[in-house]
Amino acid sequence: MTKAEKQFRLDILGPRPQDVPARDLADFIQKFDAAVRAELAPVSSEDSLREPADAELDVLAFRYSSSWSETADEPTISLVAISEGSDRLHFAVAPRAIPAVARISRSLASQDFTLLTRTAWQALHDMSQVTKRRAWGVRLCKNAALSIEEATVPIGGEVPAPDELPAITGTTVIRARVIRAGGAKPRAELRVPNRSSLLYVDVSEADAKFLGQRLYEHVVLEGVATWDPETWAVREFSVTRVTQYHPGRVADAFRALAEVSGGAWDQVDASEFVRKSGADRIDLRRHDGPDIGGRA
Amino acid sequence: MIEKTRRFIEHCDRTSEEIMVPSVVVSEYLTTFSPTQVAQQVQEFHRRFFVAPLDAAAGALAAQLANAVRTNGLNVGERHVLKSDCYIIATAIVHGADAIVTGNVAEFRSLTGGRIKVLDIPDVPTQLNMRTRSWRCTFGIAILGWRMMQAKFG
C-alpha cells in the first residue's frame, strides 16, 4: 500500500476559510480522532508480542487511571495537508486505524451507528454538535483502497446521541478506602475504584464504629452495587456486611498459602509448571501445535 | 522466573502495593487441592488478599471482551482459555486494578482492547534474601497489582 493510499479526506461544507475558527476546527478534529480511537481493534496477538513503548501504555491506560499521562500518545490519524482554503482536510491514517475509519464511514453512510462502539458513537455525536453549532456540514470522501465510503453529515444535521444504557445491579464485594464514618444517621464516606467522587453509604452503628477505626485504610465490603455500564463505576452501593479483610505483607500471605497447602506444591517444578502453561497457550494461539492439554 | 517473581513480591511489600486476586484465578489455583485444603486455602485468600468476584458487572464486561475477539477475528487460543482470561481481565477492570501482571503478556494484551495495562513480571533488583520453598505455590497464580505505576518498574 502506498503512502498516498493511506490517506483520507474530510471536507467541511459551508464556511468560507476566514469563517473557520482554529479553535472549532481543532475541536472538530479532536472529536473525530476520539471516534477513531474508540473504534480501534484490540491489538492482535502478533502485534502484542512486541513490547509496547511507554507512550502506548499511557494511551491504553488513560481511561482507567487519571494519574497516567494522556499526552504521550501515538497518532492514529494525522492532519497532513489542508487544501482549498481551510475546508479540505487530508489525514494520514495509521494502518491499525484504517478499519476504524472505514467502519465510521459505513455507519455515517448508512446512519446505522450500532456498527460502532458506544464511545465512538458518542464522539461522532459530539463532533456533529460542533459542526451544527457552526452551521457546517461534513463529508468523508470515498477511498476505495481503504474501504472508506463517502458519507455526509449535511449542514445543520447531526449524529443522534446513543441511548443511555440501563445500569447493572448485583451482589458483589468492593474494596474501598474509608474517608469518614459515623454521624447521627450512621453513614460511611468511601473512595472506590473507577469513580472520581466519593461514595456515601448507609451502615449500621456497629459497622460505623468498625469503619471509624479503619479511617484512611482499605476495607472490603459485601453488598449490592449498581454500576455504570460504560465506566464500570459504582453508582450506588448498599452494605450488607463488612469483612475482616486485613492485608499484611504479600510475602507473608504467600507463605501462609504455602503452609496450608500440605506440601501439595513440594514436588512441582515451578519453572516447568510455568513453562508448560505458557507453551500450552502459545501452541493454542498458533493453532498448529500439538494439543498438550488444558490450562494447568 | 521464580527469582523474578520472588523479587517482585518483595518489591510489592516494600512499596506497599496490594494484590488483587480474581475469584476465577483462585478457582484455577484450587484445582490441585483436596476439599479440606480448599477450605483452608480459601480462608487464607480472603483474609490476606482482596479476592475480586466475577459479579454481574464483570460478567457483562467479559462478554463484551469475548464479543470483541469474535468481531475483530483475533486468534487468541482455545475457547475455554479465552473465556477464563476474559473473566480475569473483566474482574480486574471492574474492580479497579491498575494493571494486570502476568507471564502471558501477549495474549492478555490482545484481549484487553487497551482498557487496562498488562505487564510482564517486572525485573526488580534483589534486596532481600528469602527462602525459596515458600514460594512454590505462587507461580500458578496470576496476580494483579493495585498501584503498579509504570515509573516504578520502568
Image: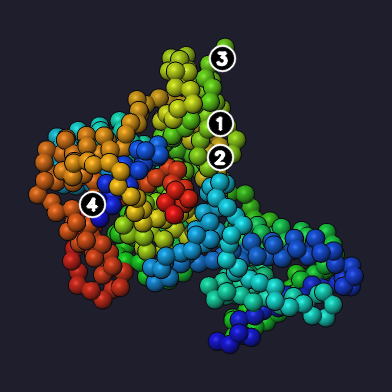
Figure check: A270 above or below A108? above
**Disc assigned to residue B2:** 4
Is label 4 or label 2 in front? 4
Q: Are marks 3 and 1 on the same chain?
A: yes
Disc 3 and disc 1 in contact, CB within 8 angstroms:
no
| Amino acid type at mark 1 | Leu
For label 3, the residue is A183
Quadrant in which the C terminus of chain A is drawn: bottom left
Q: Are marks 4 and 3 on the same chain?
A: no
| Amino acid type at mark 4 | Ile
For label 2, the residue is A195
Disc 3 and disc 2 in contact, CB within 8 angstroms:
no
Q: Are marks 4 and 1 on the same chain?
A: no
Return the x and y of residue A2 as percentages of the image width and height: 58, 87
Q: Chain of mark 1?
A: A
Q: Label 3's element? A: loop
Return the x and y of residue A69 as percentages of the image width and height: 58, 52
For label 1, the residue is A199
Q: Residues within 10 Å of mark 4 (few under 14, many from 20)?
A: some
Disc 1 and disc 2 in contact, CB within 8 angstroms:
yes
Tell which of B150 and A47 is nearer to you: B150
Q: CA distance from mark 4 to mark 2?
A: 36 Å
